[in-house]
Amino acid sequence: MKVYCATNIGCVRTLNEDSYYMPVDGQKFMAVADGMGGHRAGEIASRMAVRIFSEILQQEKAPSPERLRYAFNKANRDVYLESERDSAKRGMGTTMTGLWFGESDVLLGHVGDSRAYHVGKSGIRQVTKDHSLVQMMVDRGELELVGKRYRLPGNTP
């Protein structure tokens, strides 16, 4: 498996709140996180989440759903506790997507809208579903995706 990661600040923000962990020395896990823009300390939240996730999985020999879940829950709890402890970080949060791959399988953890894609011979396929208001509206039939834009159902472009 080949793993790639890219980050881009985009056109709106002045601060890049992205963090990621790439495998080193034969490790078989990775993570990407994006601090919640518009909230305080998103860059700190994303760095914390990725650091905690990677520290936990570095101690493991083989992938397991329970340990992946634990890594996500621990990162979430610690980010939350830090936001409660320090008023300058109150409300901070982050998305996170993490992969842990074994010899024949891949475990994927995901929260928010940092997407994971599978790139293969048959093309590029999104393998995560956003946890967002827009996605909830699409799921309920209140919005539809047409090309690269969302619109109300029944409206013509």
Image: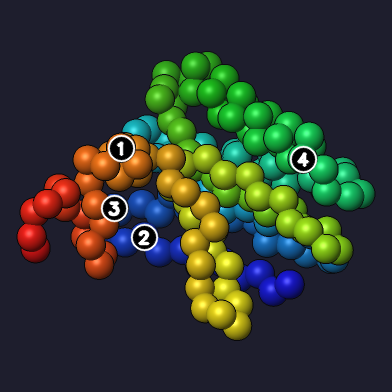
The one nearer the camera, 141 or 66, is 141
Q: Is residue 83 above or below residue 24?
A: above
Q: Is residue 75 visible?
A: yes
Q: Which residue is mark 1?
A: 140
Q: Residue at x 30, y 45 (%)?
A: 138
Secondary structure, mark 4, is helix
Q: Which residue is mark 3?
A: 13
* Picture layout, residue 18 above or below residue 137: below
Could you say which is closer to the camera, residue 71 or residue 15?
A: 71
User: Which quadrant: the C terminus?
Assistant: bottom left
Q: For residue 150, which quarter of the picture?
A: bottom left
| Helix, strand or loop under label 3 | loop
Could you tell me the amino acid type at mark 4? Pro
Give the amino acid at mark 2. Answer: Ile
Q: Mark 2 highlights which residue?
A: 9
Kindly give the residue lying farthest to the right in the view shown: 61
Q: Residue furthest bottom?
A: 121
